[in-house]
Image: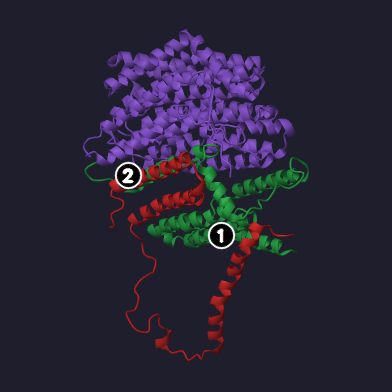
Chain colours: A red, B green, C purple
Amino acid sequence: MEGTPVQNDWYFILLFVVLSPILAAVPMLINYLLGPRKPNFIKQQTYECGVETVGDAWVQFKVQYYIYALVFVIFDIEAVFLFPVAAAYGQLPLFAIGAAVLFILLLADGLAYAWGRGVLEWV
Amino acid sequence: MTGEQFVFLAVSGLTIVAGILVVTLRNLFHAALAMMLSFLGVAGIYIMLGAGFLAAAQLLIYIGAISILIIFAIMLTRRMMQAQDTPFNSQAGAGLVTAVLSFILLVFVITRLWRNEIFDSPPEVPTAIMNQIVVQLGSDFVSPGAYVIPFIVASMLLLAALIGAVYVAWPQVEDEA
Amino acid sequence: MEFTPPEINLLIVAPVLIIMAAGSLGMVIDLFMPDGKKGWAVWLAAIGLLLALAQNIALWNGNYETFIPQNGVAMVVMDNFAIFLNATFLLTGLLVIPLSRSYLQRTGLEKPEYYMLLLFSISGMMLMGMANDLILVFLALEVLSIPLYIMCGMLWPRPESEESAMKYFLLGAFSSAIFVFGIALVYGATTTTAIPLIFDAVAANGLNAMIVTGLAFLMVGAGFKVAAVPFHMWTPDVYEGAPTPVTAFMSVGAKIAGFAALLRVLMLALPQASGEWVTAVAVLSTLTLIIGNVVAIRQGNIKRMLAYSSIAHAGYILIAVAAAADNPSAGVSSALFYMFAYLFTNLGAFGMVIALERNYGEGNLLDDFKGLAKRHPWLSLAMAYFMLSLTGIPPTGGFSAKFYVFGAAIEAELYWLVLIGVITSVISGYYYLRVVYLMYMFDGEGQLITGRALQFAVFVMAISTLVLGLFPEGLFNLTAEATLSATRLLAGG
């Protein structure tokens, strides 16, 4: 079955998907096979020099960070919507540009609201 | 087996296995990571269907933003980080039965249709190159001849969601409360 | 790429544009207003709703379509059906605002966000009535739902309000997903999402399993929104936990919008599948009527009782939908009439619940109604009248509505459905009239907190219910015209 042109474009990506883990894995594998091993207590520690870690690496984050992620989701979606519009920009009539601008303005309104509520202040 | 079939099996296998892991892993954080893997598999299926832009959107929105949001939510909640409870509750059996029945129904519906009804020939796969599809999509989004109303309504939806998210998640200002 | 400029007439979509503009403008004004001044928002919302209502009525009988895509089917139609529904939603908004005012002040909720989210939600409902494409139906469903999820949770950090928002959000998101899957299946079978083109595709190729399955998914999704049994489990908890004005708005607006989507899908996209869906609708209707009315008897909390009552009323409207399979004009127009009458009656009843609620969650028990008649004779009379109307005793709007619905069902030969409807109406009399009994026959400490706005709104609704009870023909003719203009599109005119 012949791939369509659309899919052919993506075979390069597939090539990367296959090759990149190999590229990362091969040096580690060579290292593992060739490197000499003489473990002792000092070498086995997490940090050979510096302070011993205390407690769990899982720490609770500040709740305020969550809202950044929330706002980010919204604007990420906006960017995805606007990308094709930007690609078609050259051939759009005035009304269409107006619609795109309205789209941006509405979300700017939301951003302004978030700003007014103090969401954008770093804490 | 052609290369395309092999890729399809790999991608859909990834999606399904990761999807099963999402609901069975005991550590919520690991489940979230498995979910990202499942999203990645879905993006691969979109590519195979010739919907490259949708795949890019899937990567950007689901893996880039929504999964991060979920991981944030897990990291913000101390109790959830340590939760190692069983992911099943008393309704798991009923859920399984429902899921299996729906699956059988859908397989029946979709394959029967595919064989003898409206599509005598399979629908056309878009043969245009990616750039043209994206340009066409962009102009359809904003032309009054196509999807400008849904486009603007979508931005209203995002605006309402943003206002709601900020209102619910951000602490009230003291002088208002 | 060729580009032929299509006809653009923004006046046609002006009603919904006005609401959207007022909503987003409010968020801008909010930035520049000092925190102490919050009074402007209510006027902005009210003026926006009034302007939209005026423009909406001006479009009556126009049968406009706007933004014609290349395939010749409009994304949005402004037929009388859409105009009638828009008027219903705008009136709901206009009546909810005076009902909310004093409640919001005493619960510390009076913020611009409340009114702006209300406007956003109304704009979604209006789009639902106007949508001529399943993509737009879905977007409208989301635009109306998301502000409602937030409004339910507006009283956070109180756990009941949070629980309400969370339950509504989870089940709402789930039902939206089912709805969108239904759209996908219908699209897969017909290769279009435009409602008239789905009709054409089915007319040309006939039904198949995929379309019917898609239809079933669409009905489940809409069933959640209108709270039909067995998709009603969220309703009592959500209605109880949400701030009462939001409950009032939700019980009327969201329900009517859900029926708008259901009618568009069943009557305009897939009427040829009526043989398939009429049984499903009739079964849903039967279950909804029985469970809604029987469980309502056992409720001691007025908000939960009205939640089950609203489930039961969805059952009566479903009778009309089932009747529409055989008899489209009578079925659809009686459904529209029922929803319009239900708006005034139910909002009026909720107005009294709002007035009785001293603070969030206090004064919601049925026992709190004891002895109200002595201290507030006029408002108690209005409440008693609303209860009679919800039961369906003449001369009330509720009676006229049930009369038309049962009439349509009899014409469609759905006798057993009418029988169940009549029996459950009698059962419903028990719990509705108990409120009247408690108000008039007992002594109690209950006090109403009423402002002039609330009294005026309750007065308007009582008069409207009375007018609909005494002179229903005028409205019924309007609903008949609305139905005719929607089915005109079906005939290919």
**Foreground: C106 or C202?**
C202
Write the residue at 68% across / 36% down.
C212
* Mark carried by residue B158: none
Q: Residue C402: name its quadrant.
A: top right
Which residue is labeled 2 in the image?
Answer: A113
**Secondary structure found at label 2:** helix
- Residue C269: x and y in percent read 63, 30
- Residue furthest top as drawn: C470
- Residue C156: x and y in percent read 34, 42
Residue type marked 1: Leu
Residue C490 shown left or right of residue B171 in the figure: right
Which residue is labeled 1 in the image?
Answer: B40
- Residue B46: x and y in percent read 61, 54
Q: Residue C319: name its quadrant.
A: top right
Is residue B171 shown to the viewer in this render? no
Is residue A35 shown to the viewer in this render? yes
